Image: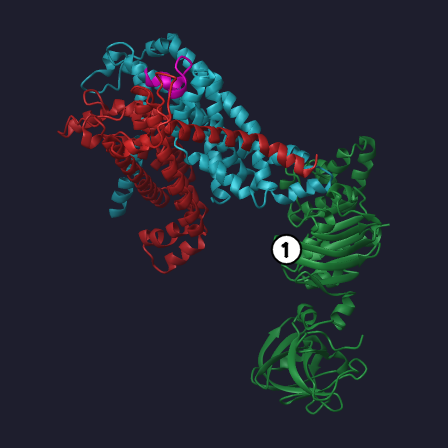
Amino acid sequence: MGKLISTTLTRALLALLIIVALGPILWTVLGAFKELRDIVTPVPKLIFEPTLDNFATILRNPTIRDGLMHSVIVVSASVLIGAVLGIPAAHTLARHARRWGDDVQFFVLSLRFMPPVAIAIPFIVIYLDLGIYDTLFGLILVYLITTISTVIWLAVPAFERVPHDIEEAAAMEGCGPAEVFWRFSLPLAAPSLFGALVFTFVLVWNELLLALTLAAQNATLPVVAASITSLGKEVPWGVINAATVLLVLPPLVFIGLLMGLLNTMVRSGPK
Amino acid sequence: MTRKRFVILSLVPAIGLLATLALVSIAGAVWFALMNRTLRSPDYDFVGAYNFLRLLRDHRFFNALEISAIWELVTVTGTLVVAVLLAVLIYETVKKPLWRNLICFAFLVPVLLPRVAAAFIWRFLYSPSLGAINYLLGLVGIGPVEFLADPSLALISVAIVDIWQWGLFFTVILLKLMETLPKDPVEAAKLDNARTWEIHAYITLPMLKGPLISLALVKAVESLRSFDLIFVMTGGGPGTATETLDLYAYQMGINMGGRISYASAMSILLLIVTTVVFTIIWKAGKKWAN
Amino acid sequence: MAHIHCTDIVKSYGAHPVISGLNLDIPNHEFVVFLGPSGCGKSTMLRMIAGLEEVTGGRIEIGGTDVTDLPPGERGVAMVFQSYALYPHMSVADNITFGLRRQGVSKADIAPRLKQVAEVLGLENFLDRRPKNLSGGQQQRVAMARAMIKTPKVFLFDEPLSNLDAKLREKLRTEIRRMHLKLKTTTIFVTHDQLEAMTIADRIVLMRDGMIEQMGTPDEIFERPASRFVADFIGTPAMNFITAQLEPGLIAHSGSIRLQLSEVEFPSLKPGQEVELGLRPARMDLCEPGSANALTGEVVLVENMGAEGQVITEVDGAEISFVTQGFRDLSIGDTVHFTIRPEHIHVFDPKTGRSLRKD
């Protein structure tokens, strides 16, 4: 009997935890399909007539559409360049650097210690002077700090997990370092690398401060979403919810991949 | 291609670009901090340490420093405590892999949300007139509570959102780490009649000492990047109750009059403190974990 | 042809020397085993010959060509790794033929060679599989096939059998040996297992702390160890060591033990000299009390090894063991007499550890 009560209690507790984790998001999704009068009620409504008006509003709004497009361009360009530059560098750090490799890795890591505001403030003036303030190019350039360093940070362990012997066996058959990297290390590390890129994508997609500081007309989706509050007089909760859903969707698509990345990282022993 | 050429070709572009960008931003910040540059006018003069001296007399700066310190402390400890408790709870009560995976997926969702989105979601929930939390509190006769407008509650209310995102995420990581631990010591302890909590307090968690230190450090670094969350939820208010250093630097440098030099001085100080502190902690943590 | 010639090889990691001035000659067609405890430099030596590690100093020649500065792929050597190092993203056939395809050998030429090595190693039915779907022994064979198909000048094996279970290890050991008898390719085989070395080698290079302790045929290493270290490393059960004083007539004396030594083997020994005796358990056996070179001890423990048994006895407070077929009649506490022939006694300098045997 005591056992039954305790299992029931733990089940209830776990259910509550899942509600705490997912509830807020589900509530927002629900809110995105409500009309304002269904949101502004003293008693929260679970049953209502769903509407697509909110999504129509945001998708028709040119600022949000532009924001979405800017986000896609800036994020994909910076992640792509980050991958092209960061992945070979990570392989070299993991394989060909004995003494100074640790120092370089620490430098890369220490860039994550830098408060974003310490990057944003000087760059706004430099960008103004150079005339690249409020350009997508400027945004991509600062985001490269994040993408290259994150890609290296996550790809070094991915390459370290590639068995050394396999690369050496390839070298024994005459492959030079570039060929070993391209034909062996890269395909073998690919699953982990893909996870690393997704993680980097999420970081940049979610970024607000730099975009807010270094762009105005060409801002990205988070900046646009953050400024919705001031559309019109009434707080447009339904529209905000819809914009939130739009913002949340891309990272959530990759949740399975991130879970896979987590599993391999944990299994190979964290640092 | 020889080894040396491959090393240079693969490393130099990436590290060179990173070093240039980092150097430019740091050198820029130092340069501007010694000037009296504003966003409004392109003219400026050398003012030496004036900006730094003014900072020492700026109450709002010290308030921001204090808020930042409290923010770091609350979010890092909160995240770790939540993660440890939940990980142990799930490890002990959920044995079926399917259920564990489902819980892990659910717990991963919050951290993936853009900070801006999380901020909106919780601002909506916290809302005194139409938020779900106040509705639930109302059912038991409390409230409405002004979570974000009450200076004594605002910081902790925002911190809860941060812990909601990261605490659940770290729970998943810890749970996965616990699953990879060797079973023998735990089984030996069971043969010694150790209680469940004793097994975790004295065996599993100490075995995870290294990863826990790394996680604490990762969270401490990540907590420095909470600008987005605070900016959208409270904007630093009410008053300056949630104004952290990066928020203050942003307000000074960009929003109010664009006092770039003053904000640069602030970010230089912030940069020095975080770099020094984290470098020390990182190296010490690495040593200690070994 | 492919003899290997290493001159004054030095290897150090930073200030830490691993190998300091090693000279080695391996004649064509020979099967040489590098043997030694872990950290003795045997794998490093192999990897330097393969080209996977750079030498800090010295030259390496393979088949008359100086390969010291050549990349591994241009040295004409093939290597089998401890972990097999198969390419997980390629099929077995692709694994085996990768090197040839890379060199641009035509498909028409590759096919018969693949067929041949696959036949020799019994891999015909696995060619389309991925390595992860093979057993450990099959993976090992693929690794060997990959090395063989290139018809290299030298085969290098880096502890290739240590990941296999005992039975399979024995089987593959025989196969490798048989293959060498057929192909006659110069081979270097690294292992820390002395039994494996004894059974497979033409010659053993026994290494310790980056130096060659002794080089010789398995028989030489076993019967005429050059030092106490070699004597201790080779042979199971391990050799007994006793410190003794020499008396006139080449009698070694220690407590109750008096042993006649061989004058032919040790002509240089002088009375009064202190020496260390090495007695192989397998070279001793039970005897009548009062026999020549008899030792008398009390049985402490009897270990049944099947056909024979190891008897551990206490002689003058120290443990000495010997191997006998008559172990079943002994029980703990018995007094036993056992003997060793003079020519089987090894004598070492107690200070340097070198053997005092005449050259």
In the picture provided, is C3 more to the left or to the right than B270? right
Residue B124 percent across, percent down from the top left: 26, 22
Query: Identity of the amino acid at label 1?
Result: Asp
Residue B140 percent across, percent down from the top left: 15, 30
Residue range of the region highlighted in magenta in the rendering: A212-227
Q: For the point 61% across and 82% down, which residue is it? A: C330
Q: Which chain has been coloured green in this picture?
A: C
In the picture provided, is A25 more to the left or to the right than C343? left
Is A23 a magenta residue? Answer: no
Q: In the rendered picture, chain B carries what hue?
A: red
Up-down relation of residue C318 to residue A23 (above or below): below
Query: Which color scheme does this rendered protein use?
Result: by chain
Q: For the point 43% across and 24% down, which residue is it? A: A123
- Foreground residue, C155 or A107? A107
**Mark 1, residue position:** C165
Q: Chain of mark 1?
A: C
Q: For the point 37% across and 50% down, which residue is it? A: B205
Up-down relation of residue B220 to residue C305 (above or below): above
In the picture provided, is C275 more to the left or to the right than B231? right
Query: Label 1 crowding class (10 Å Cα cut-off): few <14, some 14-19, many 20+?
Result: few
**Can residue C35 be seen in this snapshot?**
yes
Residue A249 percent across, percent down from the top left: 41, 21
- Tell me the SS state at disc 1: loop
Is A223 a magenta residue? Answer: yes
- Foreground residue, C20 or A82? C20
Up-down relation of residue A82 to residue C85 (above or below): above
Q: Which chain has been coloured cyan in this picture?
A: A
